[in-house]
Amino acid sequence: MTIDHETLLGWLSRLKLTAIRDQLDTLLDEAARNDLTMRETLAFLCEREIARKDERRIEMAMKIAHFPYARELDGFDFEAQPSVDPHQIRDLATARWVAHGEAVLLLGPPGVGKSHLGIALGREVIRQNYTVLFTTAQALVSALVKAHGEGRLEERLSFLAKPKLLIVDELGYLPFDPNAAHLFFQLVSRRYERGAMLITSNRSVGEWGTVFGDPVVATAILDRLLHHSHVITIRGDSYRLREKRRSGLLQKATPPLDSVTV
């Protein structure tokens, strides 16, 4: 049976085997050089096709997630933040907690790497074939308030319930008004035990009553988040301020002259 090159490329296109189609001659030459059997050649071609599809799936999922920038776990300085257990972070990168619909809370002062870890874990979760959506707390609340005012709250909650992991960054930097806190509670309730959440905050959970402007609502939110959760509290100096001190742009505070005893 003789099949011309163009016909074979057409069949590969119809089957959507685009990686094999685009590299057909190169792949067949490589299989021949390695003296692969027909079965081994088929497996080799399938492997390359799967790799290409995984690469494109990950690329698309990264765009859909709306990460503000790229961060990876390999770029996190664990030595500079000894309060963070690298083994625990690597375990979270396996995404088992996402499969179980659990929550991760990354708590600590500004600049200690909470957002870095949140984004890096989100990217690892995508590589484990789960969907992810990233948003700041302020943008999330604004979207919920707007949807509520336009009578589209159910639609918005359904959209936010779809990703397997929802990352909410910078919770606590700005206080919520009571109405916004109730909307956030509805979202947490919608995702409870069905969709995982990762939240970064500069406030300890004991301060969330102030953040949400309603201790009762804050307790209800925490009751759901903490039921199946991993809470990581990061202590230490800000990366950004540390780098400025090293470069001489910022010096440690010194007491004013009139407070110095001579």
Image (cartoon, rainbow, N blue to C red):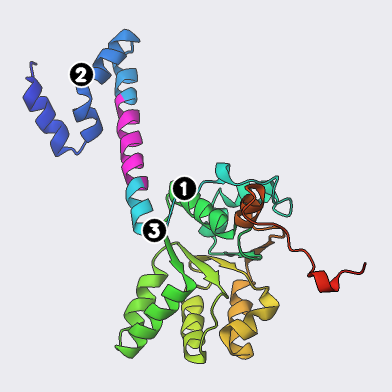
Which residue is drawn at the image coordinates 36% and 75% (left, top)? 158
Q: Residue 65 got which mark?
A: 3
Q: Residue 128 got which mark?
A: 1
Q: Which residue is mark 2?
A: 25
Q: Distance from label 2 to label 3 (Cα)?
A: 36 Å
Q: Name the amino acid type tagged 2.
A: Asp
Query: Would you place residue 77 above or below residue 29 in this image?
Result: below
Q: What's the magenta bit mostly, secondary-structure-wise?
A: helix
Q: Name the amino acid type tagged 1.
A: Gln
Q: Name the amino acid type tagged 3.
A: Ala
Residue 219 in sight:
no
Query: Would you say 121 lies left or right of 34 here?
Result: right
Q: Secondary structure at mark 3?
A: helix
Q: Which range is magenta?
A: 45-58
Q: Nearer the viewer, mark 1 or mark 3?
A: 3
Q: Secondary structure at mark 2?
A: helix
- Say which label, 2 or 3, has the lower sequence index: 2
Neighbours of disc 1 within 10 Å: few (<14), some (14-19), many (20+): some
Query: Would you place residue 33 above or below residue 228 in this image?
Result: above
